[in-house]
Image (cartoon, grey):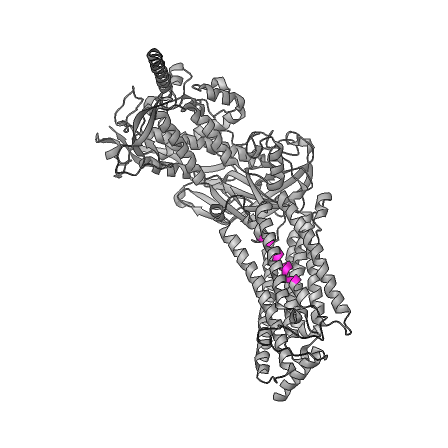
């Protein structure tokens, strides 16, 4: 009897250990900074984002679940790639004046670069920046897929579940559920990598979802009267995708107000499970639509190749601003250089539909401030 | 008019009838809210910009994409005549159905100022005129989305539209109202394709007077275009047609019954009875489920006919109000002659005629050219609307004046009423008038309230109600039922009573206990006596 109890204990301990190893090995994958498949979005040096030639094997860093998803739904991949690009471009736009300006590594086909991912190791830290990038990427994927769905370029989306019930639905009430489809794809694909129970996976899942919720919240109800000559006896409303700038703006506000958490481990039947709890009890716990992080932001002032930080040396700054884009803050107090420069630029342009711009060339002198 | 049913009906029966009608109305509202889907739905989708090829049709699935935002694409065309915007409706894997009844297409743009344009000297143009070269085609072939040869031309037209935009300086972008593209009054084909060019004047051969050197020079950059397709839902068409069929059959009975009541009278039918009958006929005409035709034939004129039927019902309804009111005026000069109402009917006719012309100029032309809209000739449109509005106002003023006269004469006569059978009868006529007015105001008021509720809370209702409650459908079925009930009440309560020689019980509160036998004189003589009385007083 005693023996068998002991045996069970031992088995349980062994099992826990096994689980622990699995979890930690998962962590290693999950902790490797920004997902490497994000490099889908990187424009090769030779020009336009070519989304038509994507194959599942050409995408680096897919976990098995994502790989299966990819091979099952290859037609979604171009939209997912566009979505990541949308997210990263928006990240750059929103953070352009901050010390970390969402800088990505130049794409090279060389292996070490592909291994590091788009952002390098910066996002390995569970910082507010990581929270922001994850949320904006998840929102971008949902946005781009919803858009492609609305354009009718996807066969698997929206109303079409390829069942007779849905065909009947189409005849009965019409259909447009593009956004829900986009959100579903984003959830299935982007979250597939963060299925673990460690703090970082929970954080990523939370922030991804927060990004998607912002997209859903920003959906605009548009209405059009279409009675006789546009009179309002008949009026129809539909949900339109928001301009992605709006989503980016809102997410940036959330990034500035992100909630700091701490990881709490506890033992459960399935092993050691982490959960995130607010670090400061005096603040209200974060809502579903708050970004969360549990590591402080890195010091982005100085170059740190190990962490993939470029530092602010050489960045352009605004000498007259006292905000984050001002030379004082951006250059971290190191001071700045001023150079008198001139540039030749197009001016007095006249634009003509669709694509003709006639400009004169102007020479403009200007002062350029760069961080020391 | 002889004694009517309403005067001889017991309160109990009246309450039962009203309750039954209330139940019917609630049932109709519930059908709209829970069985019918939303009345119409919109599917926004991107218009794909393509390079123009040698083929007749550019199809989004197979065309060569022309990028319009040169910050992303390197594939920007160098010439506007090379760009064709295209969209196939409906979305992939679906086909259109005849039950959709109509398709309206709108365009929305992302209209931006090119980044190279110097913003300090930029003068925004918020309402430029834009010229489109629309082509619409259809195909019933499966897989036609990949075969340019499978499409047949439906209509082609160069159209001008005036944009209505707001300039957002911080984004150097315009927010524009959707622009009307086309309306099809029937949906007999499985798929439609819209091809659209935005010609630039100076590049175009000047063989069309609608294109000149200024054409499309002020529209800035159209970097993205969306197409919004709006259609009736198949489910709503089914529910609506079922309701119309049932109501048509139900309303046949009171109409026939009413006319038989009138016909068996010894005297000739009176104007007021004729006007009630006309009201019933116009409602039957409106109820008649003519739309079944659209399921079997291509009838692009159905929208126009529906408008005309609706307009006809309103015209008859407004005439009925005037005649009913006037016939209760109780002065002999104006009774039982339609010529007495020439001003009122004239104003109704003028308003109807103006609106009919408006409708013909829009929906009528759309039968031939689905891209047409009356606002290509705004002055014509405004003139017709102005005539319609003025005539409508004149009608309202005349109606209110008539109402004022009626009540003045009633209050005047009350002072001189003798305490005998004539008083009872006079009060009966007054209460008859008051009850109709009550029902009318209630019906019209509910219609207006429903309309505003529906318009105002359409968006908000998403939060208050579960998604499967269809407020807009409930509004349509509810209001439709309301006017059927109104006509039903008028027909059954204002028909000549066959209890002519019995006691008038419960005519109204005042006379409820005065069980006075009516004499066999017709009301006409009674009213005549009363008006003579009035003349004497004058």
Q: Is residue A123 above or below residue B392?
A: above
Q: Which residues are magenta?
A: B475-488
Image location of residue B378, percent across then percent down: 58, 56
Q: Nearer the viewer, residue B499 or B528?
A: B499
Q: Residue at x 59, y 85 (%)?
A: B416
- Quarter location, residue A260: top left
Q: Is residue B123 among what the camera can see?
A: no
Image location of residue B142, percent across then percent down: 68, 31
Residue placed farthest to the front in the image?
Answer: A1
Q: Is residue B510 among what the camera can see?
A: yes
- Image side of residue A204 versus residue B235, left or right: left
Q: Is residue B383 above or below residue A205?
A: below
Quadrant of the image for the C terminus of chain A?
Answer: top left
- Image side of residue A275 versus residue B367, left or right: left
Q: Is residue B133 magenta?
A: no
- Quarter location, residue B328: bottom right
Q: Nearer the viewer, residue B146 or B270?
A: B270
- Image side of residue A174 versus residue B164, left or right: right
- Quarter location, residue B101: top right
Q: Main secondary structure of the magenta part?
A: helix
Q: Is residue B486 magenta?
A: yes
Image location of residue B342, percent across then percent down: 67, 72
Q: Residue at x 76, y 66 (%)?
A: B260
Q: Nearer the viewer, residue B366 or A261?
A: A261
């Amino acid at each position: 009897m005693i023996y068998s109890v002991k045996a069970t204990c031992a088995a349980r301990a062994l099992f826990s250990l096994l689980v622990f190893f699995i979890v930690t090995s998962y962590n290693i994958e999950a902790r490797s900074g920004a997902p490497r498949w994000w490099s889908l979005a990187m424009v090769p040096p030779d020009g336009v984002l070519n989304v038509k030639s994507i194959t599942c094997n050409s995408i680096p860093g897919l976990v098995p679940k994502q790989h299966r998803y990819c091979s099952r739904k290859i037609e979604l991949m171009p939209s997912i790639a566009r979505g990541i690009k949308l997210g990263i471009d928006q990240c750059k736009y929103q953070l352009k004046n901050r010390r970390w300006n969402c800088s990505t590594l130049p794409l090279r086909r060389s292996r070490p670069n592909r291994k590091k991912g788009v952002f390098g190791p910066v996002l390995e830290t569970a910082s507010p920046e990581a929270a922001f990038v994850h949320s904006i990427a998840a929102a971008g994927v949902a946005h781009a897929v919803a858009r492609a769905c609305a354009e009718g370029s996807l066969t698997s989306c929206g109303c079409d579940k390829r069942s007779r019930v849905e065909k009947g639905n189409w005849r009965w009430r019409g259909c447009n559920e593009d956004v829900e489809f986009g959100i579903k794809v984003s959830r299935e694909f982007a979250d597939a990598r963060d299925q673990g129970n460690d703090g970082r996976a929970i954080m990523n899942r939370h922030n991804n979802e927060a990004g998607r919720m912002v997209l859903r919240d920003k959906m605009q109800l548009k209405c059009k009267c279409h009675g006789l000559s546009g009179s309002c006896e008949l009026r129809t409303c539909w949900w339109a995708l928001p301009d992605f700038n709006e989503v980016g703006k809102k997410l940036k506000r959330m990034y500035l107000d992100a909630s700091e958490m701490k990881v709490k481990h506890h033992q459960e039947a399935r092993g050691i499970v982490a959960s995130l709890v607010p670090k400061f009890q005096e603040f209200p716990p974060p809502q579903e639509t708050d970004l969360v992080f549990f590591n402080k932001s890195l010091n982005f002032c100085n170059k740190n190749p190990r962490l993939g930080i470029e530092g602010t040396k050489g960045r352009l700054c605004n000498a007259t601003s006292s905000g984050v884009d001002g030379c004082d803050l951006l250059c971290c107090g190191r001071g700045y250089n001023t150079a008198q420069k001139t540039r030749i630029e197009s001016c007095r342009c006249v634009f003509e539909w669709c694509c003709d711009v006639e400009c004169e060339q102007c020479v403009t002198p200007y002062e350029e401030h760069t961080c020391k | 008019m002889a004694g009517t049913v309403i005067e001889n009906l017991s309160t109990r029966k009246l309450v039962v009838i009203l309750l039954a009608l209330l139940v019917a109305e609630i049932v109709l509202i519930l059908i709209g809210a829970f069985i019918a889907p939303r009345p119409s739905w919109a599917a926004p989708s991107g218009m794909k910009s393509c390079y123009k090829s040698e083929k007749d049709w550019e199809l989004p699935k197979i065309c060569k994409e022309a990028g319009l935002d040169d910050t992303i694409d390197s594939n920007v065309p160098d010439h506007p005549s090379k760009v064709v915007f295209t969209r196939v409706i409906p979305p992939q894997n679906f086909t259109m159905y005849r039950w959709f009844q109509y398709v309206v297409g709108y365009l929305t743009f992302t209209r931006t100022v090119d980044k190279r344009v110097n913003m300090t000297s930029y003068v925004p143009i918020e309402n430029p005129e834009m010229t489109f070269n629309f082509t619409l085609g259809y195909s019933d072939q499966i897989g036609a989305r990949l075969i340019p040869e499978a499409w047949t031309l439906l209509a082609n037209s160069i159209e001008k539209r005036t944009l209505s935009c707001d300039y957002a300086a911080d984004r150097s972008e315009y927010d524009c109202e959707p622009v009307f593209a086309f309306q099809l009054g029937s949906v007999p084909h499985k798929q439609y394709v819209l091809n659209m060019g935005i010609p630039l004047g100076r590049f175009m051969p000047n063989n069309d007077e609608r294109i000149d050197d200024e054409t499309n020079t002020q529209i800035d950059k159209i970097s993205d275009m969306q197409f919004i397709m709006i259609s009736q839902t198949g489910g709503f068409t089914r529910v609506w047609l079922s309701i119309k069929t049932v109501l048509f059959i139900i309303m046949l009975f009171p109409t026939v019954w009413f006319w038989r009541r009138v016909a068996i009278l010894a005297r000739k039918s009176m104007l007021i009875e004729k006007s009630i009958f006309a009201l019933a006929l116009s409602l039957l005409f409106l109820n008649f489920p003519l739309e079944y035709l659209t399921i079997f034939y291509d009838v692009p004129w159905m929208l126009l006919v529906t408008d005309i039927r609706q307009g006809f019902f309103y015209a008859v309804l407004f005439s009925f109000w005037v005649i009913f009111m006037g016939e209760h005026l109780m002065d002999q000069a104006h009774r039982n002659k339609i010529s007495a109402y020439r001003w009122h009917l004239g104003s109704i006719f003028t308003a109807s005629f103006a609106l009919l012309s408006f409708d013909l100029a829009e929906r009528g032309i759309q039968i031939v050219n689905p891209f047409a809209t009356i606002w290509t000739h705004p002055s014509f449109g405004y003139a017709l609307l102005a005539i319609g509005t003025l005539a409508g106002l004149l009608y309202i003023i005349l109606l209110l004046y008539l109402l004022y006269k009626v009540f003045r004469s009633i209050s005047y006569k009350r002072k001189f009423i003798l305490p005998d059978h004539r008083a009872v009868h006079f009060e009966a006529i007054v209460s008859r008038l008051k009850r109709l007015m009550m029902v009318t105001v209630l019906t019209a008021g509910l219609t207006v309230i429903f309309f505003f509720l529906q318009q105002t809370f359409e968006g908000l209702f998403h939060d208050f109600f579960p998604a499967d409650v269809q407020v807009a459908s409930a509004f349509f079925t509810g209001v439709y039922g309301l006017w059927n009930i109104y006509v039903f009440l008028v027909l059954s309560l204002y028909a000549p009573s066959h209890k002519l020689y019995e006691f008038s019980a419960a005519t109204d509160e005042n006379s409820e206990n005065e069980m006075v036998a009516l004499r066999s004189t017709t009301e006409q003589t009674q009213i005549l006596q009363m008006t003579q009385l009035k003349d004497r007083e004058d």
